[in-house]
Each structure stands twice: as structure tokens, then as C-alpha cells.
Amino acid sequence: MEGREGGGVNAQAATPVLILYPDGPGVFGDSNGVSLQAKPKIGSVQLKPGLAYDKSTRSKSKGKDKRDQIGAQALSDVQIQAYSYPDAAQIYAIMLSNLLGRYGDVVVTRKAASAYTAGEANQYYRTFYIGSTYEDPVPTALISDIMSGAKVTWLNYNIWRLDNAAIGASLSQLGLRYVALYPEYQPAEFSTGFNKIDYRGYTFKKYLPGLLEVPIEMMEVAADSPSVVVHAWAKNSAGRQIPYALQSGNFWYIADNPFTYIHEQDRYLIFADLLAPMMGRDVTCTPRALARMEDLSPNDLGADLKRMLDVLNKLRIPFLATVIPLFVDNNTVPVTQISWTQNSSALTQLRRIPGIRGRIFQHGYTHQFENLKNPSGISGDDWEFWRVELDASGNRITSAPIPGMTATSALQRIQAGRTILTNLSTRTANLTPVGWTTPHYEADPSYYATFNQVYNRVMERRIYRVGTVIAGQFFPYPVRDVNGTLMLPETLGSVQPNYLLPMVEEAARANRVLRCPWAGHFFHAYTIDPDYDGPNAYTAAQFEGFLRYVRDTLGYTYVDPTTVTTQ
């Protein structure tokens, strides 16, 4: 059983935080004279809440990638069901709760903004209002408390409601002025969209040309007092800039919803970083890195595993390896099963790992599900705890829990896989797993608390669900999420057909400017096989060069994953 070190709450020293989210259905229309060009102000495409998917699979039987993929940035798959604005609002509140899970003493209360009562913000160290629903009503009691000096952070819409003459409230009392809402700009209009944000000497991106081209939207709130601090500036290609993150005493404002369309170089990282000063914890940390060797399978070639392990050993880098206990291909009659003991060359390399600073993380049981084509039936390609069907172009047509699976049956699969790996141990090589990575990062979110019974230390991106909305999140630093799981940061992704080594390096540079930077990444042994010719192929020398660049040039220190805790 994994321990729960790092992040336990001391009730006597708890720091209470309140998160308010809108619970209305949403309003469509214009805002302060800014034309919305007859477009719905809030739409299911515009408000998809994030990312989670590890689309790094390949067909092990063919040795090629199944289809063109873009790594974890597959936003088109995040939300395919009927869209609910109140459900999305609660998702954003969960994502914020997760970010605050970096602090072991913070205790979060989430509630609908409509339930706010006068003076409530003064009972919490800080209150966050997530304005994710356009023109949702704002309680006058909250406005009055803000004007009286309560510690409040406001995100996105409805900031204009602080100009409320009926109760004598005005943004000018905070040294601020609402200017305009710049509506959703499509890629063809990006010359006027505020799609870059400057922060601490680095330019973060609200979209990635050719990869993540999504609507751009931004609020402009001007700083009319010299006492207002602008922590980050949004700018467009025409050279105009407007404040993105502002601070007026106890009041902070973020000019969009940082939880939409998040990616590895995104302004989401800015907001996550600014939580430190918002919470009165403006400290810096040694940059740290986590290296994860992915998808080790009994069907792997021992030479492939050796090639990658040799590089890691040469550089003396601590790492973790996600291991599939049993390989299955249900396309054959009878079904093909390959155990580690049937592949002596691969097993020899697996048993090297504990002796060269490696840690074993379990990666499912079979990394597929029984006789289901999910979508292929092959370990490593398939999802194990989530149902996925694809069309001919590789787009999802089904994304839902696996029919008939329960948290208990999922737990039994995990326990069976753990037993297999533990039994592979020798006197000199302990292969008992010390952590977990969910196959393709997806399981029914209701299972995660049950997973904690076996593993409470996880390195992955994770999906969350409220009602009809399913969304994912990655973490720029270690957190204990709303499920109580210690989540190790996976911030860079991995080399994919449309997300090559230079972009992984760029993500490392983006994270490096944060107060407590983490570079968590993963890699597959087959990608440096000289015989592999996929678009994401690279050499062992390039892999070594990347690790040296992260460690020696950017200054990250690779750490043992079992030593990672929250603050």
C-alpha cells in the first residue's frame, strides 16, 4: 500500500479557501457594445475544458503508429456529449481545487456563487470567483465584500458587474476600469486576437499555430492607478498589449478562463504560478525533473529496452518505468497472451531497472480489456478502464465508462497485475511497483478513490467528470487532487508524430520560468530503435542530448519519483 506522505492536512493550521462557481444556464448577447458577430457567446466548442489524453499509442504488432496523433493535446476528444454550463463551471472549480492541492494545509470549499452570503469571503484566506458563464448573476453581497477589502481572485467574465451604482460599488475603487470583451477570434482573425501572454520574461501561447488552433477570447480591464500591479500582459500580432493578470491590493483579476484549451506552453501555467503569491507563499524552488520510461511490455524486444536503459544509466538519471504486467492480443484464436517469463531478454532488462536508479510503476493489468476491441484489442494500443471507439479517421465516436465494469472489478485487475510484477522480483531486483499510471490516462473518474487503495502515488494527467462534462488536467507541480491522490507532474508530454522533440524542449523552457519549475516527461523505447521510421523517430544520441539539455542547460535536477511530495 502506497503511503500518504506529503500533503496531509493539519487541522489546527488549516488554511481555508472558498471557490465560487456560476450555476446559471448562461446568457447570449453583446457585452458593453462589443459585437459578438451573431455568434453564440458561449458554445460547446469554445468552452471545452482542457485536455488529458495520452494518444501516444502504436500498434505493437505492426511496429508503426496507428494514426497521426498530437500527444496529449487532443482537445477534440474531450467533450462529445450534451454540454452543460453549470457542470462545466464545477469542472473548473475542481481544476482550481487540484492546483491548490499543492499545499498540504489548504482546505477548499466549493459552492455555487448564488449561495454566497454576506461577509463569507472574510472567513476564508482567499476566495476565488470563476466567471466561466457569461452574464451569470453576481451576488451584491460578494461585490460589497470585495469593495471592503476581502481577498478575492476573479477569473474571466462578469467583472463588469462590479460597477454597481445601486450599492455604491465601482471598479474605480480598486483602481481598475472595464474596457471591453474581445470575442472569440478564429484562426483567420488571430492578427487581432490576444493570443500571447508575456510573463517573467517568457511568451506563453494561448494557442499553437498548426497544432492547437482554437478560438481566442480576452477581457480588457485597464489599470488606472499606479498602485495596481500587472503581473502578465496579453498581446496580439498587431503589437497591442493589454493586462492579463492584475493585482489591486487584495483583489486579483485574470482576463480569461485559464482552464480552457490548456497545453504545455499555455497561459494556464501563468495562473498556476500566480497562485503562490495569491496564497501568500511567494517562494522559489530548485527546478526538478521526472523521467518516465513508458509502456514496457512482455512483447517488447529486449534490445529496444536495453538501448534506452543504457542512456539513462550512462547519465545516472533516476527515472520511473511504467510496466504492463501481461500482454494480450485478442485478435487471434486462441487469444495471444505473453508473460514476462516467456520473454527472457526483455525480463533481463526489466530486472536491471531497480539497480540503475529506476522505480517500477504499474501501467494497468493488460493495457486492454478482455475481448473488447477498445479499439484494437492489443495491449499498449487499447484503453483498459475507459471505452473508446474510433471512426476511420481516428476520431472518437464513443468515450465513456466500459459497460459492466465497476470500481471493484477495476481494482481486481490492478491487484492481479501487481501480483504478477511482484512475483517477478528476485533477491537483487525488487519489481514490486511503487506507483501507478492509468493506461492512456483515462478511467471512470469514480474509480480513482478506489485505485488509492493500492496506489496513492501517480504520474499522469487525469480526467474529471461532473454530469455531462468530462475534462482533463495536467499539473505543473505535485498536487494531491480532489480524489486524494498524490499526482506527480507530467508537464512536457512526449515525442509524438505531430509533437516532436523541439516542442518538448520548448515546453521545458516554458515551465522553467515558473517559481517552482517541474519538467515531467515520458518516452517510448521504440522511438529510438534504428529500425523505426515513424515521424516521431529519433536517435539514442538525440535522446541523450535532450536529457542533457533539460539537466545541464536548463538546470533541472532529475529526482527519484518516490521522494516527491506536495508542499
Image (cartoon, grey):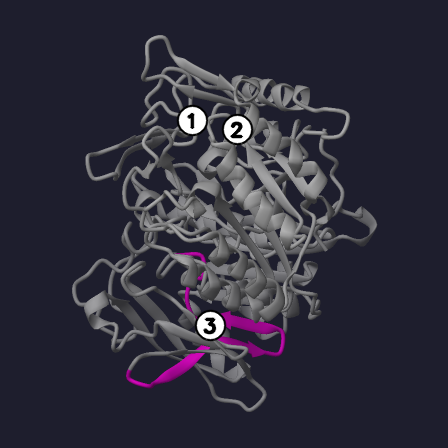
Task: Point out residue 132 in the picture as x, y percentages from the top left corner.
Answer: 41, 57
Task: Point out residue 448 in the picture as x, y percentages from the top left corner.
Answer: 56, 32
Q: Which residues are magenta?
A: 238-260
Q: Quadrant of residue 222?
A: bottom left
Most extreme residue toward the left, as rendered? Answer: 38
Q: Which residue is mark 2?
A: 324
Task: Point out residue 439 in the picture as x, y percentages from the top left corner.
Answer: 48, 33
| Gap between marks 2 and 1 measured at Cα | 8 Å
Question: Does any portion of residue 327 appear in the rendered image?
Answer: yes
> Mark 2 or 3, which is nearer the eye?
2
Check if mark 2's residue and mark 1's residue have beta carbons within 8 Å.
yes
| Gap between marks 2 and 3 measured at Cα | 54 Å
Task: Count residues near mark 3 (Cα–Cα under 10 Å), then give few for <14, some for 14-19, many for 20+.
Answer: many
Amino acid under disc 1: Ser
**In this image, 141 relative to 452: left or right?**
left
Mark carried by residue 379: 1
Q: Residue at x 57, y 68 (%)?
A: 512
| Gap between marks 3 and 1 measured at Cα | 54 Å
Mark 2 vs mark 1: which is more N-terminal? 2
> Mark 3 or 1, which is nearer the eye?
1
Amino acid under disc 2: Ile
Amino acid under disc 3: Leu
Q: Residue at x 80, y 48 (%)?
A: 10
Circle 3 sits in a helix, a strand or a loop, which is it? Answer: helix
Mark carried by residue 27: none
Mark carried by residue 162: 3
Q: Quadrant of the C terminus?
A: bottom right
